[in-house]
Image (tube, rainbow, N blue to C red):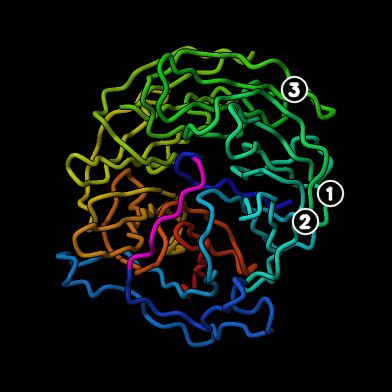
Amino acid sequence: MAMIEKIRGARRPATRRHPLCVAVLLLGGCNHDGLPTGSADGAVADLSQPPDLRVPRDLLGADLALPLPTFVKATEFDRPSDLEFALADFDLDGRIDLAEGADDGSIAVYPGKGDGTFGPPRLSLGNAGVNAAADFDGDGKADVVGIAGKPFAPTWDLYVAWGQGDGTFASPTTLLTVPSGLALFIVTADFNGDGLPDVAMTFREMANNTVQVVLNQGKRSFAAPVSTAAPDTVYGLLAGDVNRDGKADLVVVYGLITYLSDGKGGFAMKTSPAGAVGAAALGDLDGDGAPDIVAWDGGNSTLVVFLNDGAGGFTAGASYPSPGDDVSAIGIADFNLDGLPDAMATFTHQASGEIGVHLFPGHGDGTLEPSLIVPTDSWNALGIADLNGDHKPDFVLSNPGLEAFVNTTP
């Protein structure tokens, strides 16, 4: 079953940003009923002749040696979008769908059509957001984890909603209760090596902050949360096996603080000198089998590669300038299809109003090459998945709207 973890910002109360006007090429447009093109009226973007969205090389100040990917926009929602979403095959038709918290508080699943567009939403539950997807009960159906609660309630619930295999959810299980109105990060991974996805969360800002891990016990039950101290301010939460012991670990992005799993829900902290980095992503950039980190250094407006020492520690490597003054999300995948991982960063430039994604093809040795810029309308959260079944990584962006781009690299 296809399930893709989204690269995300912190889950926060429902706020809407005003779209900034950016010139982009939109194939097919969008409907005034709030549905993506191709959902209600049957129109589908023509992807047979993909345009070149690449910025000329001389504008980037480099003579690029690596192949460049190409993308076209296939879908744009003509309505504000929640910051968070999850990508998975929620209706078991072999196509990637999109789940997010709807404006009325329910979970909305937009069924994928297999071409980068999505059908009308299927709604279920209520007062719930969506942060990530995983098959928590092993029944072959994608479930979701997120925060549920009424807007002015003093507390919210961290919950898992059980997928029914038809794009709807039922019988949510509460994992723990948290104060309402606070931005937070949620990730899923197998922290104790039992083959079941667990859940970890931490707050964006909170006095006496903690990382809380909830272990999956199977049969739709979870253990009591295990807490570990965390910085009062956190810029991101990543999950991956950083020391290659077969158990997922955590990286708290405030500087870089690694939490090495003991296999029982507890973690040993290990700090790497990294400065005050922001958005970040894990991926093996140098081919040594240990995931490295690409992170945003807002103080210097650069992306920095941090190489893994194999034991869960990280050392700063090369840095690369960004065209924006803020980066909200970073993802790692082989976008140019050369067999090597690349980096993608969403950016905005406040003075000019420019919004887009910046591609950094990888050399396979831990270094990157700043290259392609794709103009977009959204930038806050990033999801990477094969939306059209051609085995190429596509991407989805959300907030202020929601849009999907398909990879047309030959």
Q: Amino acid at mark 1?
A: Gln
Q: Is residue 93 left or right of residue 46?
A: right
Asked if residue 257 is positioned above or below residue 88 in the image, the reply reads above
Give residue 369's position: percent from left, percent from top: 27, 56
Q: Nearer the viewer, residue 75 or 196?
A: 75
Q: Is residue 354 magenta?
A: no
Disc number for residue 222: 3
Q: Which residue is mark 1?
A: 164
In x, y percent, where is residue 172?
77, 36
Number of labelled discs?
Answer: 3
Secondary element under disc 1, as helix, strand or loop, is: loop
The image quadrant of residue 135 is top right
Could you say whether the residue bearing mark 3 is in a helix, strand or loop? Answer: strand
Residue density around tag 3, few if under 14, some if 14–19, many if 20 or more, within 10 Å: some
User: For mark 2, does the 10 Å Cα neighbourhood hold few (<14), some (14 to 19), or many (20 or more) residues?
Assistant: many
Which sits in the foreground, 20 or 73? 20
Q: Which amino acid is tagged 3?
A: Phe
Which callout, 2 or 3, points at the residue further toward the start of the chain?
2
Q: CA distance from mark 2 to mark 3?
A: 24 Å
What secondary structure is found at the residue carrying circle 2?
Answer: loop
Mark 2 to mark 1: distance in Å? 7 Å
Q: On the image, numbered disc 2 is attached to which residue?
A: 167
Residue drawn at 42 percent across, 34 percent down: 236
Residue 338 against residue 38 in the figure, above or below: above
Query: Which circle marks residue 311 in the picture?
Result: none
In three-dimensional space, the C-alpha distance between marks 3 and 1, rounded to whole angstroms, equals: 19 Å
Q: Disc 2, disc 1: CB below 8 Å?
A: yes
The percent coordinates of residue 44 (x first, y second) are: 62, 83
The magenta stretch is 13-20
Instruction: Tell me which secondary structure the magenta stretch mostly adopts.
Output: loop
**Are circles 2 and 3 on residues that touch, CB within 8 Å?**
no
The residue positioned 48% from the left and 74% from the top of the image is 73
